């Protein structure tokens, strides 16, 4: 992928969003990625998060 490594961090700051609590977030991926995303979304103010875990191909 162009020699760039994925770090699991957002390219831009993922701070609080004023309307995040009124939206639904969808997170899909391996368990560790989903857990990390849930933590970030919770800290940012998300109230409704739909998850879909998968272990690989």
Image (cartoon, rainbow, N blue to C red):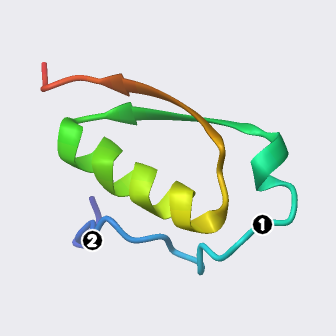
Q: Residue furthest top?
A: 57
Relative to residue 4, is residue 31 depicted above or below?
above
Residue 34, image quadrant: top left
Question: Residue 49 at what x, y percent from top left?
Answer: 56, 35
Q: SS for tag 1? A: loop
Q: Which residue is mark 2?
A: 7
Left-right relation of 9 to 43: left
The residue depicted at 41 percent of the width and 58 percent of the height is 39
Front one among 3 and 57? 57
Which quadrant of the figure contains the C terminus? top left
Left-right relation of 37 to 47: left
Question: Residue 1 at what x, y percent from top left?
Answer: 27, 58
Q: Callout 2 environment at 10 Å: few (<14), some (14 to 19), or many (20+)?
A: few
Q: Which residue is mark 1?
A: 17
- First in residue order: circle 2 vs circle 1: 2
Q: SS for tag 2? A: loop
């Amino acid at each position: 992928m162009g020699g760039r490594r994925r770090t699991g961090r957002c390219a831009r700051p993922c701070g609080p969003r004023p309307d995040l609590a009124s939206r639904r977030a969808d997170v899909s991926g391996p368990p560790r990625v989903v857990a990390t995303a849930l933590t970030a979304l919770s800290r940012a103010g998300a109230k409704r998060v739909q998850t879909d875990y998968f272990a690989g191909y």
